[in-house]
Amino acid sequence: MHSRLTKFNFTYLLIGLLSVLIVGPLTLDVFDYSSDLLTSLSFSTTMIIGIWSFHQSKALFRFSLLLIAVSLCASALDPAFPEWRLQILNMLVVMTFCTMSFIFILADITADMKVDANRVVGAVCLYLLIGLIFGIIYTILETFITGSFSNLPEEKEHVSSVFLYYSYVTLTTLGYGDITPLRPLARTVAYLEAIVGVFYMSIMIGSMIGLLLNRGNVKIVDNNSAGKPLK
């Protein structure tokens, strides 16, 4: 069972990330219901499988469980005690979790020169994690420096999802212009994310494609050398 999980570890992680991005907006649009606890629960239950499957350290696994417990408690207490400290704590926990995942995935997919389907999925996970981390940074910025961005919703519970949207729009350099950074620090973080997005696609994805092409050329050469000489 463990070897099977390890073989497809990044697939489980990708499912977790997609659930985090989709569950909240889907329940809001379809059922007109928004819950940070539901989003946190979907994030925690799926990401824990990814953490366990691509790292065998029991200490790190227990630390991940602690982070998940803190995140769930903060989300559960938020409706009763809507204080910014709980919200910041939850965001920091999630960002720590995402940063840990990013480091482990990056170390795994760059450990050698091999490229397979699982590692390609891992590269996709890295890209999604970058967007999540920057989305949390934007939320923290707006919490401490109010007015850093324009055109934010009045409902505070929707701000985090809006910043996730803005983060991925910035990461892909799409830039609809509906949300605009106004203060210097917010603008700096925004253009840094755009730079990271461009370099990630050109370096990481380009390198993986190059390795796949080289592996294909090696196989062709090996097949030709193993055959009979052409007359």
Image (cartoon, rainbow, N blue to C red):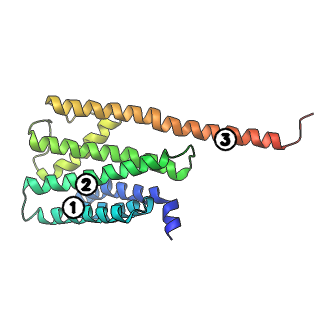
For the point 25% across and 44% down, the residue is 135
Determine whether 87 is above or below 72 in the image: above
Query: What is the three-letter code of the residue carrying label 3?
Result: Gly
- Of the numbered discs in the image, which one, if any, rests on residue 71? 1
Residue 162 higher or lower than 62, as above or below = above
The residue under label 2 is which amino acid type? Val
Mark number for residue 216?
Answer: 3
Mark 3 secondary-structure assignment: helix
Q: How crowded is mark 1: few (under 14 residues within 10 Å), some or many (20 or more)?
A: many
Whichever of callouts 3 and 1 sits on the residue coming sooner in the sequence is 1
Crowd around label 2: few <14 · some 14–19 · many ≥20 (10 Å): many
In the picture provided, is 50 more to the left or to the right than 113? left
| CB-based contact (under 8 Å), mark 3 and mark 1 | no
Residue located 53% across and 66% down the image:
3
Q: Distance between the residues labelled 2 and 3?
A: 39 Å
Residue type, numbered disc 1: Ser
Percent position (x, y) of residue 35?
A: 19, 61
Tell me residue 79's x, y (percent).
10, 63
Q: Is mark 1 on a helix, strand or loop?
A: helix
How busy is the neighbourhood of tag 3: few (under 14 within 10 Å), some, or many (20 plus)? few
Residue 221 shows in this picture? yes
User: Which label number is shown at residue 94?
Assistant: 2
Q: How far apart are marks 1 and 2 (CA)?
A: 7 Å
Is the Cβ of the residue at disc 1 closer than 8 Å to that at disc 2?
Answer: yes
